[in-house]
Amino acid sequence: MAKPVHFICRAPQAASVSLVGDFNGWNPAADPMHRQVDGSWFLEVPLTHGHHRYLFLIDGKPTPDAQAMGAVRNERNELVSLVAVS
């Protein structure tokens, strides 16, 4: 069963922000985020139970989430964000 998870990226100067992760095949076209009035970017994604790795793509640049529950290294030793869904 999937639960709605809210992702917020604070990047007011960005022209575009996408959410990429193990839940969407790291595909930037799958989950574009929506700019909010305050300049932050928002997206609600249904995720299944467990731990999921993700990054924000801010104007095409992979960026870890500063507000993430945790961070881990991927197979290329790059820092990625971690969210736990229970």
Image: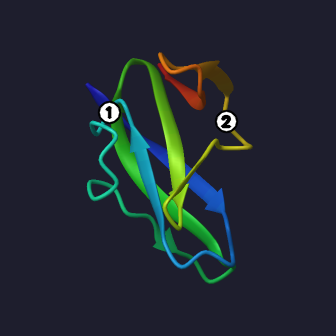
Q: Residue sitting at 44 percent across and 64 percent down? A: 33
Horizontal and vertical percent for residue 77? Answer: 58, 19
Horizontal and vertical percent for residue 37? Answer: 62, 83
Q: Residue placed farthest to the right in the image?
A: 66
- The tag on residue 59 is none
- The tag on residue 23 is 1
Horizontal side, residue 15 vs residue 47: left or right: right
Nearest to the observer: residue 78 or residue 57: 78
Name the image colouring.
rainbow
Residue 32, quarter of the rendered image: bottom left
Q: Residue sitting at 59 percent across and 27 percent down? A: 78
SS for tag 1? loop
Horizontal and vertical percent for residue 31? Answer: 33, 56
Mark earlier in primary sequence (2, 1) = 1
In this figure, which residue is indicated by the disc labeled 2?
A: 68
Q: Residue placed farthest to the front in the image?
A: 76
Which amino acid type is shown beneath numbered disc 1?
Answer: Phe
Which amino acid type is shown beneath numbered disc 2?
Answer: Ala
Horizontal and vertical percent for residue 51? Answer: 47, 18
Q: Residue placed farthest to the bottom in the image?
A: 37
